[in-house]
Amino acid sequence: MGSILIALSAWLPCTAAAGDPPLTATERRAVVDDLGRTLEANYIFPDKAKIIARTLREHLDRGDYDDAGTKAALADELTRDLVAASNDLHFFVGVDPAFVADYAAKKDPLLSVVLRAKERQAEARDNFGFTDLRILDGNVAYVGLSHFADPELGYDAAASAMRFIENSDAVIYDLRYNNGGALEMAQLLASQLFRGDKDQELFDYYYSDDGKRIARGQWVLPALPAKRLTGKPVYILTASTSFSAAEWFAYSLHKLGRATLVGERTAGGAHPVDRKPVGNDFFVQVPIGQIMDPVDHGDFEGQGVAPDHAVASADALGVAHRLALADIARADPAKQADIDWLAPTLAAPADVRPADLKAVAGRYEGRRIDIVGGKLLYTWRDRFRLQLDPLGDDLFAIEGVRDFRFRILRKAGRVAALQRINRDGTTIDYARLP
């Protein structure tokens, strides 16, 4: 087996294909029997697999699947019973004859090359999981990941991302909507956060594969395509939709004291999975392994990973950004002035009444402010225009500008001037014109 995977399909319903013929009782029994054998050969808990397989046969014998007249309906029934019997959200039964055919084809060296090329094309359309790369204010890197791609396919994308963030002073990994994937990609990305000249284990796990039992450990990689971020603050954003490999990335780095978690408790899917064919048309997504953290040798199955800073997932990025800036300032007090400058832009958006906007609009020396679409539009030299964003207390940021901002000066309660505040603390006043 190549990579430890988890698929989003575990949370998606199975739909019947057009013209799907009704299943006979003999066909339903064949599926349930084959599913039981597959579980016993691959489920990480062999004794429990026997009990689950027996439970499914009991459902069949009681006639619980008699109304499942189509393959899709039977798959849905089996999924529900598997999850109920195991309390493991990883389980999923689906209908996919193409997958079953491809699974068999992988044993043919020539066909396996073609299939691998198709996988690469599919991953490339999703940019191998890297959905967003940015450098936030204060030189904080932001890495948005929808899933962890197999690094054999996504190595170049990962290398580019790692090089992009290598000069940052802190990094935020956004795993709020990450449903897992290849643990080997998590290993590659995590390796950038540790020294390469000292052995450090990240994950320790074992798994079953068609009756074979395999033990593996994953360690920090000694050679990387980018500079390491050793000692730099690391924040990981979590949500209830963070699952499997995403949870392990957060959990292990937190256990190792290398990351601070911000957001919500994760889903609690600790077991690695694989897809196995069942008959000619079905497949089962089955937990094949058990992973343990390198510190306490525990996991989070059914419990999830708790954040250090519990906030609504929608607010996690802003909170993590502010925490990262505070870490940067503590490490280098000379950067405190820059952090103070950024503070107003990271606060909650100011609530400005339309009447307040109307009071600000007008002409000033060499420039003017208009209200366009309910927003303030700043114009100078009659051709350059940028939006003003209220920061509160008559302070405004300028769209795309980091080196200065504006403050409204008032006299006797009326707007008297527009003051430019430069980042170095100097100011220039532009009087309001009649």
Image (tube, rainbow, N blue to C red):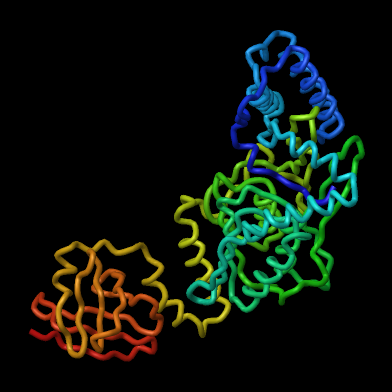
Instruction: From the viewer's side, name the closer residue of 75 and 347.
Output: 75
In this picture, is 333 found above or below 201?
A: below
The residue at the point 67 percent across, 17 percent down is: 22
> Which residue ends up furthest to the top in the rendered image?
62
Tell whether 43 sits left or right of 8: right
Left or right, 171 with reference to 320: right
Whether residue 405 is situated above or below residue 243 in the rendered picture? below
Q: Quadrant of the C terminus?
A: bottom left
Task: Give residue 384's quadrant in the image.
Answer: bottom left
* Figure check: 420 above or below 318: below
| Residue 289 appears in the rendering | no
Please determine whether, in this image, residue 237 is positioned above or below residue 429: above
Residue 154: give x, y in percent of width and height: 72, 61
Please tell me how many numbered marks the rendered image carries: 0
Residue lying furthest front:
19
Relative image position of residue 89 (x, y in whole percent): 66, 35
Q: Residue placed at 22% from the left, 69% from the top?
A: 372
Q: What residue is shown at x 71% (from left), y 28% (from top)?
A: 86
Q: Is residue 122 left or right of residue 141?
A: right
Residue 309 seen anywhere in this rendered image of the structure: yes
Residue 138 x %, y %: 50, 76
What residue is at 73 percent from the left and 53 percent from the top? Answer: 119
Using the rendered view, name the quadrant where residue 55 is placed.
Answer: top right
> Where residue 262 appears, x then y in whole percent?
54, 56
